[in-house]
Amino acid sequence: MPFLAAIGALIASWRWPRATVRLAWIAAASVALLAALDLLGLTDPVRPPLVIAILDVVAILVGAGILVLTTRGSARPA
């Protein structure tokens, strides 16, 4: 889901700016949620190794940053 939403946002960015913001928000929220679930051990009974855990934390931070930027950007008048 995050991959498809990110590709959709990229495609929509040329013609549909409102759809781009929504799709980017969906992709970022999905990535952050899936990374958090992985860190908590809910997607796989085996906890991820340290390197993957670090990448999960980075994905959560990047996803949160995108969520903040898209929320701020959508508040501006068109």
Image (cartoon, grey):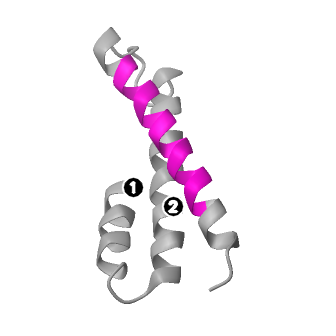
The amino acid on which the numbered mark 1 sits, given as a three-letter code, is: Pro
Looking at the image, which residue is at 29% across and 78% down?
11
Q: Is residue 26 left or right of residue 50?
A: right
Give the farthest residue toward the bottom. Answer: 15
Residue 15 placed where, x, y %?
A: 36, 89
> Which class describes the residues within 10 Å of circle 1: few (<14), some (14-19), or many (20+)?
some
Q: Which residue is mark 2?
A: 26
Q: Amino acid at mark 2?
A: Ile
Q: How many marks?
A: 2
Please say if the residues under marks 1 and 2 sit with CB atoms less than 8 Å apart. yes
Q: CA distance from mark 1 to mark 2?
A: 7 Å
- In this rendering, is residue 29 above or below 49? below
Q: Secondary structure at mark 1?
A: helix
Residue pushed farthest top? 50
Quadrant for the C terminus, please.
Answer: bottom right
Quadrant assignment, res 70: bottom right
Between 43 and 72, the one lying in front of the other is: 72
User: Image point 53% across, 45% down: which residue?
Assistant: 65
Residue occupying the point 49% across, 35% down: 60
Range covered by the magenta-colored residues: 53-70
Q: Residue furthest front?
A: 77
Image quadrant where one finds the N terminus: bottom left
User: In which quarter of the view is residue 5 placed?
Assistant: bottom left
Query: Which sits in the foreground, 56 or 39?
Result: 56
Residue 24 on the magenta segment = no
Q: Which residue is mark 1?
A: 2
